[in-house]
Image (tube, helix red, strand yellow):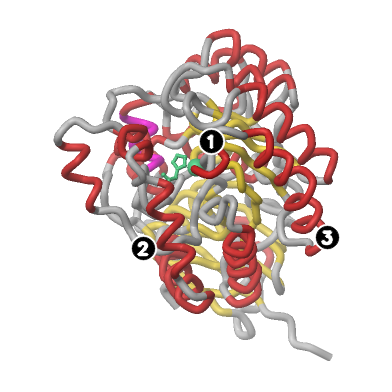
Amino acid sequence: MNMKQSVIIKNIASLLATKAHGTVRAGKAQGEVEIIKNAYIITEDDKIKALGTMDEYKAMGVDESKSAVIDATGKLVTPGLVDSHTHLVHGGSRENELSMKLHGKTYMDIMNAGGGIHATQRHTKEASFEELYEKAKKSLDIMLSYGVTTVEAKSGYGIEDFDTELKQLEVVKKLNEDHPIDLVSTFMPCHAMPDEYKNDREAFINKVINEYNPKVMEKGLAEFADIFCEDGVYTIDESRRVLKASRDAGFKLKIHADELISFGGAELSAELKCVSADHLIGASDEGIKAMAANGVVANVLPATAFNLNTGKYARARKMIEEGCPVSISTDYNPGSCPSENIQLAMQIASIKMRMTAEEVFNAATINAAASVLRTESIGSLEVGKKADIAIFNCENIDYFVYHFGINHTYKVIKSGKIVYGA
Ligand code: IZC
Ligand code: ZN
């Protein structure tokens, strides 16, 4: 018989737990958490077995001899963080765009001049599978070091070059097998309009719908489909058509909506009942209301807003007030957010979007799990869920958000194994 693997974390200053069944948190509940002071948590194999106060722990008379025991005196323990929007797999980098930005060029100026996504497209095409794998693996190691245990990863740097799209998705698949972090895969060929289709946009869209979608589905390489719906990229009507067809092909839906201007992407996400709409910097009042009414997760990407440096941030307060569940992700990518640091994204959300520490933690855990349809297994610490646990070098969630720009992580446990800080 196999020995059961067990980790005991005890003397925890603050345990961010959920005794009731964890589910997406919207409105007032976005700001509600359950904190157990002087707590313990025990895992068995890949699951959470028990949690509670140290008084309860002592009364149980636990035999510690067969477990890895972690003393978490003075530490904060939370669910493993979920980064539900990244462009993880890509070739190269775009630091050459920094001085252009400093001289006043916008994201779209750079893209329209053949840089931006088009530059990364060239770098990703040139890179071998192994190069992409090694680069993305390094980023996953960094994410893990920040307390992240689940990451969504998109294709979208092959675009019309379908082999490169497949190469990206195959890298995600292999990393999901090899790396402790769990990956959720998203197919996003409509990330830019290829030059050669500029005068026949329908032809490219037909290709995506009729050729690419069925092939990716058949190979089982992606669970979600996404599109860059934005002025100068894909129109509302094009996005509607592509997303509907993607849904018919079997994909769950995400959308890059209202990142740069108010464009109607939030409204479209509600109309299509997308699982999440992401960015939303320019989302309208009507769009936010419609999203709330249709259960769309508002996945805000504060580090991108910071780096775009237009001074505008998604209106998280309005979203929470209207009842949208808000999640926070990095948007890690080589252009608009060259940073894997989800802790910084959470801190920017608090400072610039006025989200409380409670709202921020729900956003990066249970609501982020909702934006990848994983609330049944991850996103909260409760008995029976996956033992994905982050331990931070601070006593409470307020301190975590307040002391910004550093890495608070002490240890990370993924599926019951100590995978960082062992
Ligand atoms: O490479 O610029 N916004 N897609 C939409 C991105 C940013 C990624 C990039
Ligand atoms: Zn993105």
| Amino acid type, mark 2 | Gly
**Residues drawn in magenta:** 345-351
Check disc 3 and report the residue beneath it: 218
Residue 92, label in figure:
2
Q: What element carries label 3?
A: helix
Q: Nearer the viewer, mark 2 or mark 1?
A: 1
Q: Distance between the residues labelled 3 and 1?
A: 29 Å
Residue 356, picture quadrant: top left
Prevailing SS of the magenta stretch: helix
Name above or below for residue 195 compared with residue 146: above
State yes or no: Cβ of the residue under disc 1 lies below 8 Å from any atom of ligand 1. Answer: no
Q: In which quarter of the image is the N terminus?
A: bottom right
- On the question of residue 187 being in view, the answer is yes
Residue at the image position 63 percent from the left and 31 percent from the top:
297
- Give residue 177's position: percent from left, percent from top: 65, 74
Q: Which of pointers 2 and 1 lies earlier in the amino acid sequence?
A: 2
Check disc 1 and report the residue beneath it: 198
Q: Which of marks 3 and 1 is in front?
A: 1
Q: How far apart are marks 2 and 1 (CA)?
A: 25 Å
